[in-house]
Image (tube, grey):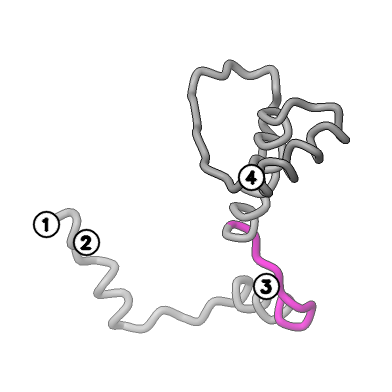
């Protein structure tokens, strides 16, 4: 997944509401990283968004399960007569 960079054109605005304690916490953390609050929040939010999306697009399996999955892909069952008939018929989207 491509990581977004700070050099990209930023034409969109976002607004968030935070408690005083949250605002202070984020401000202190941004200062420690020598970033503006905007830079800090965007960096952290973007990284987390990429992580969440990666969880939805990557499959993690134990080795034994992965091997069984690959074997199933490499050795598909023979198509049944019902499946062959189904594949000859136009799909519901083509009717």
Residue receiving disc 2: 91
- 79 versus 60 height, above or below: below
Dot 1 or dot 4: first in sequence order is 4
Task: Answer few, some or many: residues within 10 Å of disc 1's Cα (few below 14, many 20 plus, some between 14 and 19).
Answer: few
Using residue 27 as the reference point, say whether residue 42 is left or right of it: left
Residue 88 percent location from the top left of the image: 24, 66
Q: Quadrant of residue 24?
A: top right
Residue 18 percent location from the top left of the image: 57, 45
Classify the position of the C terminus by image quarter: bottom left
Q: Are marks 3 and 4 in contact (CB under 8 Å)?
A: no
Residue receiving disc 1: 95
Find the distance from the CA under tag 3 to the CA under tag 1. 35 Å
Q: Say which element carries label 3.
A: helix
Q: Are marks 2 and 1 in contact (CB under 8 Å)?
A: yes
Find the distance from the CA under tag 1 to the CA under tag 4. 59 Å
- Residue closer to the observer: 42 or 83: 42
The residue at 67%/37% (across/down) is 41
């Amino acid at each position: 997944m491509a990581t977004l960079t700070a050099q990209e054109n930023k034409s969109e605005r976002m607004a968030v509401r935070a408690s005083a304690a949250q605002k202070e916490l984020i401000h202190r953390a941004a200062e420690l990283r020598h970033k503006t609050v905007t830079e800090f929040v965007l960096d952290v939010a973007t990284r987390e968004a990429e992580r969440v999306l990666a969880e939805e697009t990557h499959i993690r399996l134990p080795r034994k399960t992965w091997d069984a999955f690959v074997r199933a892909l490499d050795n598909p069952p023979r198509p049944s007569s019902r499946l062959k008939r189904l594949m000859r018929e136009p799909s519901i989207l083509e009717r």
